[in-house]
Amino acid sequence: MNTTLTKESVLVQKLEEIQKVLTAHVHEVDEIGVLSGSAGIALFQFYYAKLTGEESYADQGVEILASIIEKINTGYNFHTFCSGIAGAAWTIQLLQEEGYVDLDCDELLSDLDSFLIQSIAHITPDDNFYDFLHGILGIGYYFLKRFEHTQNIALQHTYRQILADIVALLQERGQHDNSFTRWESYVIRQEGVRGYNLGLSHGIPSILNFLSRLAVHQEFKSEVLTLIHQSVAFILSCKNEDTSRSWIFPSWVTTSQQKSENSRLGWCYGDLGVAISLWKAGKLLDHEPYKQEAIATVLHTTRRKKLEEAGVKDAGLCHGAFGIMHIYNFMYKETGEVACKEAADFWLDKALEMAIHQEGHAGYMRWQGGENAGWKNEINLLEGVSGIGLAMISYLAPFDTKWDQCMLMG
């Protein structure tokens, strides 16, 4: 058996282990969102069912969705894309789009609209306002999905207005100068330091990504084009002048123009996240210079092979080896760049080598930093084994997978 087949057999085995872990522990998850809640686990079950042809896994996904709906009906009222209702509802719409469930999303989900609209109004500028995971962008991302797939003309008009209002808020609260647009937030909250976040998870690249997805619709194109071009101009202005460094973009820039001292390799922060949004902007606008910036950025990252230098400690999607692998695999499929395929295979090997934790799920645990630093078991999509499993499925699958839209890729 050659190396490729051996690697595939290991992935198949790991997926079996992950599925069993998720079945055993999903009831312990209190949150319902797609990235840190049970909706992300439902995504795994449906995609795993398609990969294996085993319908019972999809049945488990249906059970998870039923429990999510029951929670909402009995008072669950947390709004975010990462943990709450926006992310859970987005997942249901995606599964309907993929043909995994047959639900009337107009009837099921429209009852949530007023709550989510009110949630946008209650998010203050100092409370993760622009944040994709926790602020208005994640809610807006859900409404964009509904705008694109609703069968109800009146609802589509409502979603058009909600999205236009979000764009107006971004326009109003952005800082516009010297052909740049940028959005200020806390970059070191515990020290009260404000600036411009360049992470895909919480910062300006996610705004660019969101606006680029709006731009494909004529209803929004004229409203967002200037914001797109000026936000790209700002992002590109933040490049490190020292081209010998292994990273191009800092994680953040303070209002006094101080840049972060280093930048990790990962989805949440660093060059790969910036490249994803530059690529989406370039592709959706058919703008070759943005696409070339994205490709050059990704290719520059492929020289980073040492875990410590790259800031990689675990295997999760957010900032771990499987997340890096999946991004390179995604960019290879998008661009055909062989270096991306080679980098994906390199990081897949690293990720498989990390399955060493006897107390872990399928051998994996996530590293938690800070005051309570240590290895923790986690089953969610963003940092846990359901996300690891979804990356494995995308690597193996002979079909396209759309789950990574929840991470602003597909």
Image (cartoon, rainbow, N blue to C red):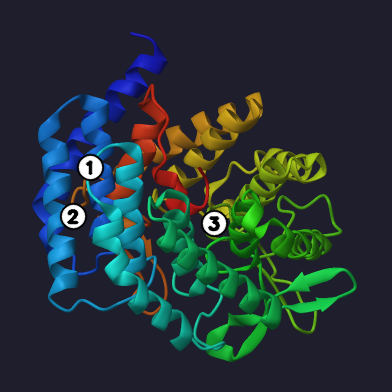
Q: Please, is residue 393 above or below residue 105 in the view?
A: above
Residue drawn at the location 30% of the way across and 77% of the way down: 78
Mark positioned earlier in the residue sequence (3 or 2)? 2
Q: Which residue is the site of mark 2? A: 65
Q: CA distance from mark 3 to mark 2?
A: 35 Å
Looking at the image, the residue that sits furthest to the front is: 154
Q: Quadrant of residue 155?
A: bottom left
Q: Check if mark 2's residue and mark 1's residue have beta carbons within 8 Å.
A: yes
C-alpha distance separating marks 2 and 1: 10 Å
Q: What is the three-letter code of the residue carrying label 3?
A: Gly
In the drawing, does residue 279 fall left or right of residue 130? right
x 40%, y 83%: residue: 118
Give the mark nearer the N terminus: 1 vs 3.
1
**Above or below — where is 97 with respect to 71?**
above
Q: Amino acid at mark 2?
A: Leu
Q: Amino acid at mark 1?
A: Val
Q: Which residue is mark 1?
A: 101
Q: Position of residue 251 (x, y in %)?
A: 65, 66
Where disc 2 sits, the SS reads: helix
- Residue 391 is situated, as x and y percent measured from the top left of the image, at 39, 39
Q: Is residue 271 visible?
A: no
Name which residue lies at 79% across and 84% down. Answer: 256
Which structural element holds mark 1? loop
SS label for mark 3: loop
Residue 374 position (above or below residue 340)? below
Mark 1 closeness class: few <14, some 14–19, many ≥20 residues within 10 Å: some
- Residue 311, numbered circle: 3
Mark linked to residue 202: none
Mark positioned earlier in the residue sequence (2 or 1): 2
**Farthest residue, direction top:** 1
